[in-house]
Amino acid sequence: MLKKWGKYTLATMLVTSLIASGCSNGANEGGSNTGQTNAGEGADSVKTEGFPIVETPITLKMFTRVAPVNGPFKDMPVFQDYEEMSNIKVEFIETPTDGFAEKKNLLFASNELPDALYRSGLSQLESIRYGSAGQLIPLEDLIENYAPNLKALMEEYPEIRAGITTPEGHIYAIPGIVTLGSARTDKRWINQAWLDKLGLEVPTTTDELYEVLVAFRDGDPNGNGEADEIPMTARVGMPIVNHMAGAFGLDAQMGYNINLEGDKVEIWSGSERYKELLMYLNKLYTEKLIDQELFSHTEAQYLAKQGTGNTGYFFDQTNNNFLSIEDQYVGIAPPEGPHGDRLHSQISAVPRDYGAFAITPVNKHPEATMRWIDYFYSDEGSTLLRFGREGEHHELRDGIPYYTEELLSVAEDQAKMTPYAGGGAPHLISDKVASFINPPQVQEAFEELEPYLPEIRYAPPMFDEATAQQVNILRNDIDKYIEEQSTKFIVGALSFDKWDEYQSTLEKMNIKELEKLYQEAYDNMAK
């Protein structure tokens, strides 16, 4: 019987970039636990429950990514307090987001390894490659014996184990985990105040959405006498395609542009349904119903547009960016398309942020390290990581942590106190620790989407290294071509008279071979 990893579940994203390994199995001279006593080494001295984790203090060095909004990790309350609790001091090797991938590659190529990688964003191919080369250690036995929180989550959500286990049965990296459905997808926000002013109903079809966007453009809903409204916007580039794909019957199975018809894998990037989607978006863009800066604005500019109240329809996970005008917006269901399809396929994985944490062989305390990271897969540890100290940074209401008003008034302070800001931290996001991103308005918006989520979501395959490299090489060229040409079709720089040529080029780029590799992986899941 075919494996089904659970309702509304996804696995981690497939590898998107090939890296040079430069691997060897040498040790990192002087890299770990410098000046620390060896008295506490070994599994026997590590507590399997409770604190401290070790009686004799130890120091671990961890390579990590630092987002622009973050402050120094050593100043974050979570790591200060947890050091006292655990008897484990962490010295972070901080690397800015810009250039992080290059620094990470150099770290492995030079074999100057830390004890662990935190918030490391290891791809599947990276973890398999470095694990096979002996630069990352297998974690499955450590999880079994020293990670009760993570182990319990993997038992409750089998798709987690499926998404991080190699064909050989090893786990070389662990992800961030999101069990809260509303934290795993962007919502569809529409300007209810504009609908009310123009006497319009919430659109339920793509045709109705078009008519509403025209009214937003021409009806002066902001009342300033100027045609300055933005009817619809989205994050830069292709996200608009992904958000509208479900209305044209296009799903995102196996972590890619894949529909499953029976047991047949279809990559739909050259299909007639995809052409219809692009033609619809081209119509919206040409008539200035979609933000004309869609392919040029920055993330910061996009988020700022939400807070102006001058946008009619957009997509975001939370309401954080328009809190001051939150009453103006409401979450809605996806529109029904021309063939009766009404699908919201853009829901991310329960195991999110693949490769968020890994341990290297130079680490003298792998058992203690696994106990250290496991704490953040509990509600208590995740609360400390995301919300800091009770009373100082957050307060509890009915057992749920909320930022203090003082902290909420200074957004920069929130970002500086937690590694959650900037994304990618290895921890648990559950309904117990998501008050900031899951207030009632967001919960209601998710409820509008929930009936239209795919009932079954198949995990992307964890290919072996050789196949992963083959898939990666094919996708590097194919994905780039699809994005470039799709953008041109949408903005009108490429006529749809060239569609046959587009399809022919995809065939020459061996998209059928890529489809075959996914088909073989899907078939193996049935064994």
Image: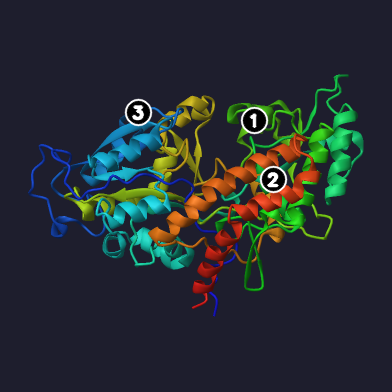
Front residue of this view, candidates 376 and 425: 425
Residue depicted at 23% across the width and 45% down the height: 115
Give the Cα distance between marks 3 and 2. 37 Å
Q: Is residue 246 above or below residue 193?
A: below
Q: Position of residue 45 (x, y in %)?
A: 14, 56
Q: Position of residue 82 (x, y in %)?
A: 29, 42
Position of residue 262 in the picture relative to residue 493 (left or right): left
Disc nearer the start of the sequence (1/3): 3
Q: Which residue is mark 1?
A: 302
Position of residue 378 in the picture relative to residue 2 (left or right): left
Label 3 Cα neighbours within 10 Å, binned few <14 / some 14-19 / many ≥20: few
Q: Which residue is mark 2?
A: 241
From the viewer's perspective, is the residue at label 2 or at label 1 nearer?
A: 2
Q: Residue furthest bottom?
A: 1
Q: Which residue is mark 3?
A: 72
From the viewer's perspective, is the residue at label 1 or at label 3 nearer?
A: 1
Label 1 Cα neighbours within 10 Å, binned few <14 / some 14-19 / many ≥20: some
Position of residue 188 in the picture relative to residue 86 (left or right): right
Q: Disc 3 residue type?
A: Pro
Q: Disc 1 residue type?
A: Tyr
Disc nearer the start of the sequence (2/1): 2
Q: Position of residue 344 (x, y in %)?
A: 69, 54
Residue depicted at 64% across the width and 28% down the height: 297
Q: Secondary structure at mark 1?
A: helix
Is mark 3 in CB contact (under 8 Å) with mark 2? no
Q: Quadrant of residue 166?
A: bottom left
Front residue of this view, candidates 163 and 381: 163
